[in-house]
Amino acid sequence: MDIDNIECVSSSDGVEDDEIHSSVAAHNHHHRKYPLKPQNISNNIAGLVQGIVPATSVHELLECPVCTNSMYPPIHQCHNGHTLCSTCKVQVHNRCPTCRQELGDIRCLALEKVAESLELPCKYYTLGCPEIFPYYSKLKHEELCNFRPYSCPYAGSDCAVNGDVPFLVSHLRDDHKVDMHTGSTFNHRYVKSNPREVTNATWMLTVFHCFGQYFCLHFEAFQLGVAPVYMAFLRFMGDEADARNYSYSLEVGGNGRKLIWEGTPRSIRDSHRKVRDSHDGLIIQRNMALFFSGGERKELKLRVTGRIWKEEQNSEAGVCIPNLCT
Ligand SMILES: [Zn+2]
Ligand SMILES: [Zn+2]
Ligand SMILES: [Zn+2]
Ligand SMILES: [Zn+2]
């Protein structure tokens, strides 16, 4: 939501920004001060942090003119002083891409030193990360930053969309036409007329909204070794640490038999594929699934019921420990 607000006001003047943002993001004054789009922010921030050097140019100097990535040591230069990152240097066959002269093997120590003295905010600054890092350790942090965007949890295609949770929820609803449910219990029926077609993994996704959080329920068919199976599992739209605050159960049955799964939802930081391949969910053999479906075993008709609940935090430790004294 913060992103939307930030983008909405990007054309208005600074005073108005302050007023709008003070109510929206008062918990994070950074948002209020620099309501900039992510792609513009690092240039401008460099100026704010450094103060002395016209920082836009420093930042531009550290951008490889070929691949436009930030340069890290060893930074190379040609005889005329054109700089180049080490990845690109290998690929230009000893010709400076800027002036076409022979490149040689000159390192640009001065620029490396300048970079070392820089301190820059995390690039997920606009998403709420307040951290500032020395140039060379920024990259490491950004790979693990808790504010980094999530990838789209939709499993059916290689969707390249990413963003924060509210953004992805709208994206799932509007672009993938995913079913949205409010509440922590569900009762779903999965019907497929030709369940033998298991090689083309069919799958479904439903999003649940409860406890102020969003959860993705995946249901799909795939080949587990030689056995065709169905699998259902829940993912939490948030980080691993928060996912652990929740539990869920899934039940499927029919004809007097029942399978029950109880687990902890996995974070959507873990890919759909990774969770599936770790078998962290309710797995139903196809024969069993057809048995549950009743009838002539020609059609798959699975009723899956489930529940999501919040784990008691800091519950009195004694409660779970059996009383050995009595
Ligand atoms: Zn490069
Ligand atoms: Zn050159
Ligand atoms: Zn960060
Ligand atoms: Zn998507």
Image (cartoon, helix red, strand yellow):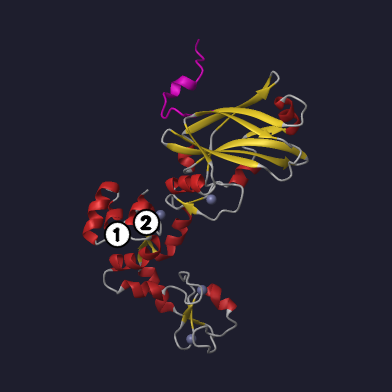
Q: Residue at x 30, y 68 (%)?
A: 47
Q: Quadrant of residue 204?
A: top right
Tell me if the residue at label 2 has its CB under 8 Å from ligand 3: yes
Q: What amino acid is labelled 2 in the image?
A: Tyr
Q: Residue at x 47, y 58 (%)?
A: 140
Query: Count the marks: how many?
Result: 2
Q: Report the front residue among 245 and 196.
A: 196
Q: Are marks 2 and 1 in contact (CB under 8 Å)?
A: yes
Query: Chief secondary structure of the magenta span?
Result: loop
Q: What amino acid is labelled 1 in the image?
A: Tyr
Q: Position of residue 5 (x, y in %)?
A: 33, 52
Q: Nearer the viewer, mark 2 or mark 1?
A: 1
Residue 318, visible in the rendered structure: yes
Mark 2–mark 1 distance (CA, rounded to whole Å): 10 Å
Q: Pointer 1: what residue?
A: 34
Q: What residue span does the magenta drawing correspond to?
A: 307-326
Q: Pointer 2: what residue?
A: 125
Q: Position of residue 141 (x, y in %)?
A: 44, 56
Q: Position of residue 320 (x, y in %)?
A: 49, 21
